[in-house]
Image (cartoon, rainbow, N blue to C red):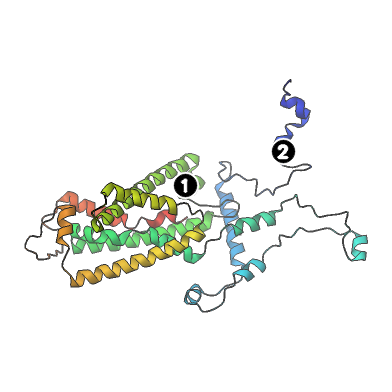
Amino acid sequence: MAMLQPASVALDGGDARLSTNGEGIAEYSRAALRATHDPSVTFEEYLYYAKIARQEEDALPDASHPMRMLAGFGKKKSDRRMSMNMPSTEPTVQLSEKEKEDGMPRTDSPPDFSVVTDQEWHQAARAARTATWGAIFYLITTDVLGPYSVPWALSQMGYGPGVTLYTVFGALAGYTGYQIWQMFLALDSTQYPMKTFGDIAFRIYGTLARHLVNVLQSLQLIFNVGVIIIANGQGLYQVNRNICYIVCCVIWTVLGMLIGQIRTLQKFGWIANLAIWLNVVVMILTMAVVTHSDPNYDAALTAFGIDKGDGIVHTTAGPPATVDFTGQIVGLMQAVYSYGGAMLYC
């Protein structure tokens, strides 16, 4: 059987399989056909559609204050938000004069459901953002790993430099988060959604910068996951030494893979909520135990080779005399790492 060439299939009309409109083909809106990362789109166009998106959000009816919602006061108005001041997604049917006189449309003029209007596409794109502000708060807060490295960092730097650096880095992290927020509001839109830091780099510097930022962030995430698995494996091994340390790390790896099957931030927010309160409980118990109990010298000797010595807890304002410059730098890096939760902001 001879193979037909594309030119013989469609003659001068081109390949019909590549067409986006015509008989039997759904006609999509122009917004739906846009490429997410199109180098030909100008920076001004991103700003233009972002302003339109912010104006549409400002036009939505006000719901109850988040703090009142969190405390259980006030009623949710999310259903009203979707029904008021929002463009209708119902297809519009043009009635003829005869139909208007009869009071009902003719059966031989059905609505054209194959056409996806701009309003329908915008409504669907907005509906895809299902995560609430509470779920996002828990996700971002869960990603901040500061409390667990503070004791060791202070033991390397002393109370003076340690408290100062944590305060400075906390202020810088807050200002950086504000900058990311402003960039997101200025560049994100329904037509061009912004989900990663690579999208910010792409809108300003182009495709190469987007790939570079995505690769660097992927490497950071890989190292973060490795550090978390090692730390949790050490904790599990200290609780039960009958289990091999490698098996402890494998257990946390498998648990992470299972939890990673959750695909939506809306559902993942419940687990993040639980993680937040677990962190709060652990910090409260740790402070209570430190206040009324002696250090665990046996665990310190096993994990770090630190001897009990005279049994007296020594605190210093500056770096301890037993810690060299390299140890102080590592403690400083722990203070920086504590505010690594900004990766989820976009």
Choose top left, top right, bottom left or bottom right for residue 76. bottom right
Residue picked out by circle 1: 198
Q: What residue is rendered at 18% in x and 51% in y? A: 327
Amino acid type at mark 2:
Ser
Q: Which of the two labelled residues, at mark 1 and mark 2, occupies the earlier sequence position? A: 2
- Specify whether residue 224 is in view: no
Q: Pointer 2: residues within 10 angstroms few (<14), some, or many (20+)?
A: few
Q: Is residue 44 left or right of residue 240?
A: right
Classify residue 60 by image quadrant: bottom right
Element at badge 1? helix
Tell me where residue 217 appears, x and y as whole percent: 40, 46
Question: Relative to residue 78, is residue 235 depicted above or below?
Answer: above
Residue 139 is marked as none
Front: mark 1 or 2: 2
Residue drawn at x 43%, y 58% is 179
Q: Position of residue 154 (x, y in %)?
A: 21, 60
Residue 303 seen by the camera: yes
Kindly report the distance in space between the C-alpha atoms of the residues bearing marks 1 and 2. Answer: 31 Å
Considering every residue shown, the one lying at the far top of the view is 2
Query: In the displayed structure, does residue 204 sit left or right of residue 62?
Result: left
Seen at 59% across and 64% down, the residue is 57
In the image, taking residue 224 as reference, residue 94 lies left or right, namely: right
Percent x, y of residue 279? 34, 65
The residue indicated by pointer 2 is 19
Compared to residue 73, the image places residue 13 above or below, namely above
Q: Is residue 100 above or below residue 336?
A: below
Residue 33 drawn at (x, y percent): 65, 45
Local SS, label 2? loop
What is the three-letter code of the residue carrying label 1?
Answer: Gly
